[in-house]
Amino acid sequence: MSDFNPKFLVDNDSLSGNLFPRSIKVLVIGDVMLDRYICGKYERMSPEAPVPVVDFENEYARPGGAANVALNLKNLGAEVALCGICGKDKSGKLITAQMIGNGVDVEGVIFSESRNSTEKIRILGNGKQLLRVDKEHTDLLNQQEVEEMISAVAYKLDSFGPEVVIFQDYNKGLLNKTTIDKMLTLCRKKGVFTAVDPKFENFYQYQGVDFFKPNLNEFATALGRDLNATIEELKSGAYEFADKMDVGILMVTLGEKGIFVSNADGQFIRPAVETEIEDVSGAGDTVLAVATLGLCAGMELSRITELCNFAAAEVCSKAGVVSIRENQLIERMRTFLTSGESASG
């Protein structure tokens, strides 16, 4: 693979038919969240504190975290089951109801007596995020919850029969050394493809996975040094990472710089797609879903990475955490082709 290729691969021929096969079964394991939005307008500052006063207009809630990964996969044509933990509260009921309404199997979601559901509450004024309030428990699962979670994963591996298992880790307590080791052992016994979006605390716990997708900040923090988004520094970081971790493919998202990929065949960066950024929340979930389906479909890595960049541009152009549909991804690429950019660069 070349170090850097500024040319885009997309062309009209590549947009015919379906991008992804329709029969891929994916089991998503991870931190389930509810993203809640309170929206309004503001024209004045509060007399009580130097903050804007938002006049309420509406509110809504969307699946977040591992639930957003599951929704992305479902909207891209996969058959999806979700394993996670929610509290026995209104938010937990709402998350699972939204998943069921979108055709996601939530049989593997357990409900805790001791934890509330994770919520990210965002206050939006004039279309911009002003404040975020987090309601969550980040302590590790208790012994009973660990046993229930492992049992749920084992059951879904047997009953659902996934081709791939995705771990979406937000450091909320579900995924830790104990649960990760046990779940990966179960996956290896089944011979399924494993993909991981890691966070800081468990970064080096996912030994031997097939696909590993941190962002640049997470990657640099795990290596214990600053990293610029240059091919030289990223290649150096990838070699250092390979000395510690046995993974098949490393993909590092670089924000506006694009995506870096490293595997046994080499390393490369594919450039980001220019877009007007509205909100980057949830873009990593979308990239994880697109990349995993592309790998399962046998696409070349350069093609997969480009699809990920287009998908990230699409969801970042919208407010809040949103999932992507296959027709939206195709339309984003068609718009690129007709916007004056050429497929040959």
Image (tube, rainbow, N blue to C red):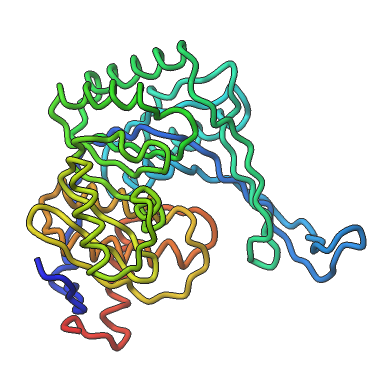
Q: Report the label total.
A: 0
Q: Is residue 148 above or below residue 30?
A: above
Q: Position of residue 17 (x, y in %)?
A: 16, 61
Q: Residue at x 58, y 23 (%)?
A: 115
Q: Is residue 81 above or below residue 2?
A: above
Q: Quadrant of the C terminus?
A: bottom left
Q: Is residue 26 left or right of residue 278?
A: left
- Quadrant of res 23: top left
Q: Position of residue 195 (x, y in %)?
A: 25, 41
Q: Position of residue 206 (x, y in %)?
A: 27, 35
Residue at x-position 38% and y-position 22%: 107
Residue 205 image-quadrant placement? top left
Q: Residue at x 15, y 45 (%)?
A: 248
In the picture shown, does residue 276 fall above or below 212?
below
Instruction: Write the residue at 55% across / 40% down.
Output: 34
Residue sticking out furthest to the right = 47
Which of these two is toward me, 176 or 88?
176
